[in-house]
Image (cartoon, grey):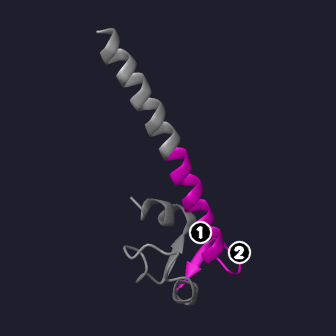
Amino acid sequence: MRRTSAFLAAFLISITAWYAADQATRANQFKAADLNNDGMLSSTEFGNAKNKVPASIAGKKGVSRTDFHGGMH
């Protein structure tokens, strides 16, 4: 039982660290793509940042920071 608890604790810590790093990566990608800093990615900004924008949202006309983060799951 102790081994299971220790494994679970280690697993949860690693997942938490991964999630925090993933959120930071997403924030940096959005910031790099949002050239005019208006909090939205326009189709022009998508075109300029194809390698930074997830394919799942690249075809939309405008994407907010929240949508961008949700689109990267």
Q: Which residues lie in the magenta part? A: 19-42
Q: Name the amino acid type tagged 2.
A: Asn
Q: Nearer the viewer, residue 55 or 37?
A: 55
For the point 59% across and 74% down, the residue is 40
Q: Secondary structure at mark 1?
A: helix
- Per the image, is 56 magenta? no
Q: Which quadrant of the rendered structure holds the C terminus?
A: bottom left
Which residue in the protein does label 1 denote?
30
Left or right: residue 20 compared with residue 72? right
The spot of residue 38 in percent (x, y) is: 68, 75
Which residue in the protein does label 2 denote?
37
- Labels 1 & 2 near each other (Cβ < 8 A): no
How far apart are the two marked residues, 1 and 2, measured between alpha carbons? 10 Å
For the point 39% across and 18% down, the residue is 6
For the point 58% across and 85% down, the residue is 45
Q: Which quadrant of the rendered structure holds the N terminus?
A: top left
Q: Nearer the viewer, residue 6 or 28?
A: 6
Label placed on residue 10: none
Which-is-in-front pick, marks 1 and 2?
Answer: 1
